[in-house]
């Protein structure tokens, strides 16, 4: 099991940091720019009601990889990446394994590979040693995909079990320091799909200086069978995916068309 209440904080430099990987997608097309090799890391402390991957929640399990071996595996697909593609680390919550990602991204950048961090930001903290590691990680990250689960702190807590204050703190830090991101938001009837919240979120995103893209992700029910298989109660019983009209409405209120500025850096 991982130390320091689940966040990876390895100090033994002689040993390679092991990553706990849930699964790998070799031709990912939705987790960052271009075609990407996506490693979904195992472990998450949030409990988003709409999570369609509850099988990634357990911490300290999964297939063990070293950064060297995972990078070697990813490089088999380099020919398909073109100018935009590369490697994405997703989850679960990727930042719970920050030492492993740092090792992986450093080595990937040394080979000129585009790196993308997909995170919900829940482990973010200004406390040490996490913050220094995060600062270093940002230097090796080309773009981040950041989910904002709910703009309202109290509703965020109801929806995920955790506050959004440190998550918005992470986004602010990235904005202040020039680190680029895509912001993603799950549109969920009866939870996030209210015009007031969407307007608040849209206004908030306008204050962030480094947003390349904003995506509305319509809630779907494809994860329901996983809950049944794992014997976990599904908390959104009876809630249907949003209509196309509501998705278009959310895109309008978040002004998604204004954010088309992704550039390969
Ligand atoms: S942060 Fe992601 S993996 Fe964790 S519960 Fe939420 S949707 Fe699932």
Image (tube, helix red, strand yellow):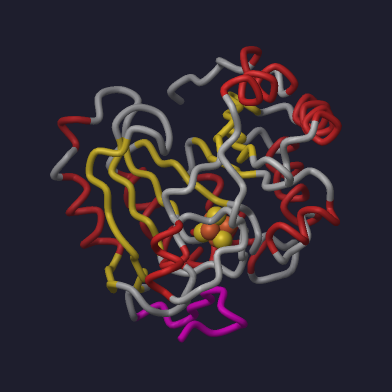
Question: Residue 38, how many percent across, how many down?
Answer: 33, 47
Q: How far from the left and from the top, in percent, is residue 68? A: 25, 61
Image position of 254 with respect to 92: above or below: above
- Give the magenta-colored segment's residue range: 1-14
Q: Is residue 90 above or below residue 123?
A: above
> Looking at the picture, does residue 4 appear above or below residue 7?
below
Work out whether residue 231 or residue 167 is closer to the camera in this orientation and state it: 231
Residue 21, image x and y in percent? Answer: 34, 65
Question: Relative to the observer, which residue lies in front, 233 or 58?
Answer: 233
Q: Is residue 65 left or right of residue 264?
A: left
Q: Quadrant of residue 28?
A: top left
Q: Is the stretch drawn in magenta largely helix, strand or loop?
A: loop
- Identify which residue is drawn at 50% across, 47% down: 118
11 is within the stretch colored magenta: yes
| Residue 104 among those drawn in magenta | no
Toward the viewer: 208 or 31? 31
């Amino acid at each position: 099991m991982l130390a320091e209440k689940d966040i990876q904080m390895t100090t033994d430099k002689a040993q390679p940091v092991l990553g706990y990987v849930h699964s790998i997608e070799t031709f990912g097309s939705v987790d960052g720019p271009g075609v990407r090799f996506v490693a979904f890391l195992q472990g998450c402390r949030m409990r988003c009601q709409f999570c369609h991957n509850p099988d990634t929640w357990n911490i300290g399990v999964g297939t063990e990889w070293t950064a060297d071996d995972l990078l070697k595996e990813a490089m088999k697909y380099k020919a398909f990446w073109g100018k935009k593609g590369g490697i994405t680390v997703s989850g679960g919550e990727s930042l719970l394994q920050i030492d492993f990602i740092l090792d992986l991204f450093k080595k990937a950048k040394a080979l000129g590979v585009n790196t993308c961090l997909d995170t919900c930001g829940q482990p973010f903290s200004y406390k040490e040693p996490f913050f220094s590691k995060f600062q270093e990680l940002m230097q090796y990250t080309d773009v981040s995909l950041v989910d904002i689960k709910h703009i309202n702190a109290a509703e965020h807590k109801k929806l995920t079990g955790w506050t959004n204050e440190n998550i918005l703190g992470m986004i602010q830090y990235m904005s202040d320091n020039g680190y680029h991101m895509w912001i993603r938001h799950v549109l969920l009837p009866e939870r996030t799909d209210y015009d007031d919240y969407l307007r608040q979120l849209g206004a908030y995103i306008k204050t962030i200086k480094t947003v390349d893209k904003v995506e509305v992700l319509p809630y779907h029910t494809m994860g329901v069978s996983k809950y049944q298989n794992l014997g976990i109660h599904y908390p959104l019983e009876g809630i249907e995916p949003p209509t196309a009209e509501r998705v278009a409405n959310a895109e309008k209120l978040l002004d998604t068309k204004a954010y088309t500025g992704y550039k390969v850096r």
